[in-house]
Image (tube, helix red, strand yellow):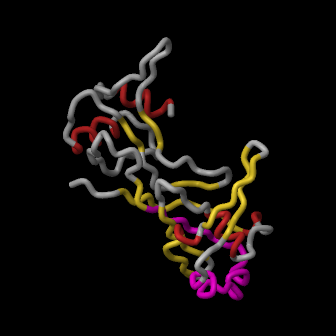
Amino acid sequence: MKVFERATRRADIPIAMSKGFNPHPKLSILLALGVGISGIDEVLELELLQTIPAETLIERLNSQLPDGIRILSAEAIPHYQKNPVLDVIYEIVFKDANLLKNLDIHNLLQQTSIIVTRTKDDCKKTLNIRPFIQEIAIKHNSLTLSIKITPEGTARPEEVLQSLHLNGRKESFEITRTKVNLYSYT
């Protein structure tokens, strides 16, 4: 986050600050990635003090960001919209393509419920992740997942893999979030 704080300051972007004893810039990365998951298309949310044209914002920020980090697009979203994310796409690349041969994706997608148990602070919660799974596709040695994000929750890619009986083989695949799709406000 420091890289974006520094870039906004150097680019003279009028960013809102939090209130209180130790104010900090109001910026965040939407949808934190889970441990061991990489991302190549992330969304940075900034709260600005004044309107700046998207092209100007992109140009000014990119001039201050290090190599390898680029702002590709910008869009104003309504202030009242708390979660502008529609869905996310994950690509899971398998080191051994044979693991994909016996997957019964069709059967999984025909199910009306897929119950998983989440544990947080010694509290167990069950959740039906099936409504969040939009699509699963196999391409060569990879699996592509399209997962819906809603106020009620979402499915984690690890949970989808678990429902496909691939949860015990974490060393045999790499998970990358390749796309975060936002609601369109234009």
Decide if residue 33 is on the left or right side of residue 96. left
Q: Is residue 20 above or below residue 126?
A: above
Residue 113 occupies quadrant: bottom right
Magenta residues (range): 87-110
Q: Position of residue 142 (x, y in %)?
A: 60, 75
Residue 108 occupies quadrant: bottom right
Locate the C terminus and report the quarter of the image it occupies.
Answer: bottom left
Q: Position of residue 103 (x, y in %)?
A: 68, 84
Q: Is residue 154 above or below residue 112?
A: above
Q: Residue at x 55, y 59 (%)?
A: 154
Decide if residue 61 is on the left or right side of residue 140. left
- Asked whether 99 falls inside the magenta stretch, the response is yes
Q: Residue at x 62, y 64 (%)?
A: 157
Q: Is residue 135 above or below residue 9?
A: below
Depth check, front residue: 18 or 119? 119
Q: Residue at x 79, y 45 (%)?
A: 122
- Counting every numbered tag in the picture gives 0
Q: Position of residue 56 (x, y in %)?
A: 22, 39
Depth check, front residue: 12 or 168? 168
Decide if residue 35 is on the left or right side of residue 132. right
Q: Is residue 138 above or below residue 160?
A: below
